[in-house]
Amino acid sequence: MKKRRKKKKKARPPRQDMPRQNPKERINNFNEVALGYPEEAAVLEANRCIGCPKPKCIDGCPVLVDIPGFIKLVQERKFVEASKKIKETNVLPAICGRVCPQETQCEIVCVLSKIDKPVAIGRLERFVADYESAAGEIEIPTKPVPKGKKVGVVGSGPAGLTVAGELAKMGYGVTIFEALHKPGGVLVYGIPEFRLPKAIVAREVDFVEKLGVELKINFVVGRTATVEELFAQGYSAIFLGLGAGLPWFLNLPGINLIGIYSANEFLTRSNLMKAYLFPEYDTPLQVGKKVVVIGGGNVAMDAVRTSLRLGAEETHIIYRRSRKELPAREEEIENAEAEGVIFDFLVNPVEFLGDEQGRIRAMKLIRMELGEPDESGRRRPISVEGSDFEYECDTAVIAIGQGPNPLALSTMKDLKLNKWGYIEADMETGKTSMKGVFAGGDIVTGEATVIEAMGFGRIASIAIDKYLTTGKW
């Protein structure tokens, strides 16, 4: 009796790499580094999905995108339909596909990751969103019957855009009030062109506006009008998506020397005010030959890579822990390393030193060693006594985090804040201590990711609808 031969399992294709600009070329331009999947690579990557009966990836997504659903459509080459599937719960897919840390959210729980690398969910999301746009097939959902109530949204960052788009799809009249002259919040002032082209942000904002959302720029809530005045103008609920835009500085001698920037100012000048296109745009942003960026997060990587493109000959990351503890995305660290950024670990500044003209000429650094883990779970850095030394530089960027801007908050006396100055809001609804006022994103959680802010916006949209439907607070 002949033995039956076992059928060989069809070999699964390897995870598809995304083409990128050559490092030697990209440090001389501000064009997007990651070039996106070609069509065949996208289909190959989608075909890696094993279609598991109990997918965990949806639970890993803060806005609950139907990930298996859209990937199946990619497998079937129904790319436009795949983008529409994502937009059922995510109004900013082209942005999320570029800047969201999928590796710590939807991809980390991908069942395939137990035996292989996870499906590149973010890259597929980017592909279908860009395909839909290039095909000219972006459709606006049919507008629902108006509910006759208005909602004001303060801030046009990821949280604000999400809550506005979701409420517009429900039939509410929504107005976004944006303090700056361009909508997008951190998406336009914080993230560089080479990581998130501003044309992509404009395209996504345009989609939200076409859902029926009104956008008012140069409108500073707390100065142009208060929240109480917005209620008096007929808004039934207000969502505060103010972000965290107040930079933290180091309280060290010499911090006011010329040539020291906050990352917030440095990136806003380059991104929003187009300093990288000087003199076409009249925004000067001088960097010296040797630039140091203090910090280890994504903002620090954005700042140091921007300084390279602005003409710095040598760029350094100064970080008080080791590479293992760097909080930035691994992809961004790898990009910085490939571009020639030098990482100086286990050192920390204690003083900035200036020349006769009041410009920074050097820093005094001290060496660090790692002790027991702190509340963040990372090992606590401890100064090594007597190890300080002088370190030459002519530009320094401080990228150690940002906090809440008190301008709008100072006008809302009944709004409860926590000890760090962030708004206290219910994490399940976004409700604050003021009736009719909801909040979400970085102004509640502190600095977080784009998709986490969007998740908060989606939660708040559901809660706002419930409040305006039932009248119960």
Image: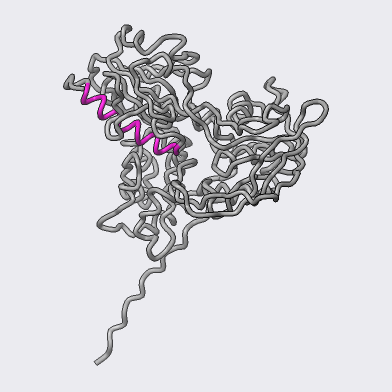
- Magenta segment's dominant SS is helix
Any part of residue 16 in sight:
yes
Q: In this view, does 354 lie above or below 55?
A: above
Q: Is-magenta flag for residue 16?
A: no
Residue 77 image point, x, y percent = 38, 49
Q: Is residue 98 left or right of residue 3?
A: right
Residue 165 image point, x, y percent = 35, 27
Residue lying at 53% horizontally and 30% vertically, measured from the top left: 199
Tell which of 47 and 91 is nearer to you: 91
Q: Is-magenta flag for residue 463?
A: yes
Residue 325 image point, x, y percent = 53, 51
Tell which of 164 and 47 is nearer to you: 164
Highlighted range, magenta: 448-467
Residue lying at 33% horizontally and 7% vertically, measured from the top left: 233
Q: Is residue 2 above or below residue 357?
A: below
- Quadrant of the frame with the N terminus: bottom left
